[in-house]
Amino acid sequence: MPFKSGFITLIGTPNVGKSTLLNALLGQKISIVSSRPQTTRNRILGVKHVPGGQFIFLDTPGILEPKGLLNKSMVQISLKSIAEVNLIILMIEPFSVRPAISEDLRFRLIKAGRPVFLIFNKTDLIDKKNLLPLMEQATHILPFKEIIPISALTGEGLDVLEKCILQSLPEGPPYFPEDMVTDLSERFLVGEMIREKVFRLTSQEVPYGVAVTVETFKPREDKPIIHIRATIHVERDSQKGILIGKQGKMLKTIGQQARQDMETLLGNQVFLELWVRVEKNWGNDPNLLRRFGYGE
Ligand code: GDP
Ligand code: MG
């Protein structure tokens, strides 16, 4: 059997479960997840090693109308990924087909000229008998190479998905070493873990006003502990107040939860020092966007 490998992009509307699927396939959390749209801001690369093959997944921000510079950069990341891959996985929710696949997206997919899998995610939420008509409707929209119902949350259908991916990929070398799961640095991942807790614990505009930088990431000399110092940047004083919370309670909870994730990731005890800083309107400042890792 020849070895097969290739790049696979996960696309779909915000909140459809792209990051959840990536983490489920990898068996490790590298992409942060929340119930809010637009949690993922960068291109997240994850490598899955299977007997006879290597899948290189690109998790992307959702495709939506760009508003502001940050969103523009996120949509660019998603659309760029379509043209550069061996396989496109388009994820939609199992409630309807038409609105989820816009005319514009259909056109872009045809233009990309790559095989496309259509995945109905979140099938744990529906009566399975509703699936067949949806799958039938989908065949009229695009010549999808496969149409597969899954639940990224329960793991249902993931074995079928993996089999189909292996079949579809071209012959190719293992691009990444066997022990590599992502190209993202541990420093980036710990910053993302903090951002995820902000998405989960605060509401309204606060999560969207937040960026995280990690200034210190080093083992302590006296003890087997990793010292991490990070800053949560916000756009407004009011957001700073919410993030810190009454008597620092919110910041403490964010720190505690993020630290647990970090310790799982790093397999080490972590001492986490968290700061909050106001950077007025950073979301529309090209220099700050670059500094926070959202540049082109
Ligand atoms: P993304 O924006 O496409 O990356 O979506 P996320 O992976 O961040 O997931 C958005 C929300 O949908 C989170 O609350 C997930 O827990 C939830 N979710 C993802 N997959 C499933 C699924 O298969 N079933 C259910 N019920 N919820 C899911
Ligand atoms: Mg995501």
Image (cartoon, rainbow, N blue to C red):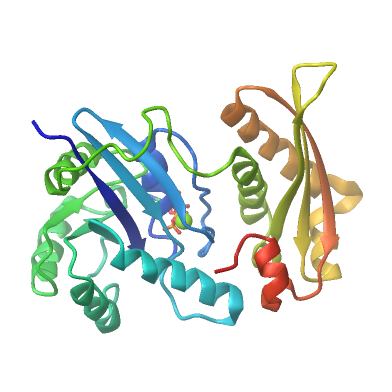
Residue lying at 28% horizontally and 36% vertically, measured from the top left: 174
Q: Residue furthest right?
A: 247
Does residue 13 appear in this view?
Answer: no
From the viewer's perspective, is 150 left or right of 257?
A: left
Q: Position of residue 150 (x, y in %)?
A: 25, 47
Nearest the camera: 106 or 135?
A: 106
Residue lying at 41% horizontally and 43% vertically, measured from the top left: 46
Residue 221 in which image quadrant:
top right
Q: Dividing the image into 4 quarters, which one contains the N terminus? A: top left
From the viewer's perspective, is 30 left or right of 106?
A: right
Does residue 105 appear in this view?
Answer: yes
When the figure is inspected, residue 70 is found, relative to residue 30, above or below; the finding is below
From the viewer's perspective, is 283 left or right of 113?
A: right
Q: Position of residue 254 (x, y in %)?
A: 73, 45
Residue lying at 68% horizontally and 78% vertically, measured from the top left: 284
From the viewer's perspective, is 14 left or right of 277?
A: left
Q: Position of residue 69 (x, y in %)?
A: 60, 78
Residue 153 in which image quadrant:
top left
Q: Position of residue 127 (x, y in %)?
A: 21, 53
When the figure is inspected, residue 93 is found, relative to residue 248, above or below; the finding is below
- The count of marks equals 0
Q: Dividing the image into 4 quarters, which one contains the C terminus? A: bottom right
Nearest the camera: 229 or 34?
A: 229
Residue lying at 12% horizontally and 44% vertically, measured from the top left: 167
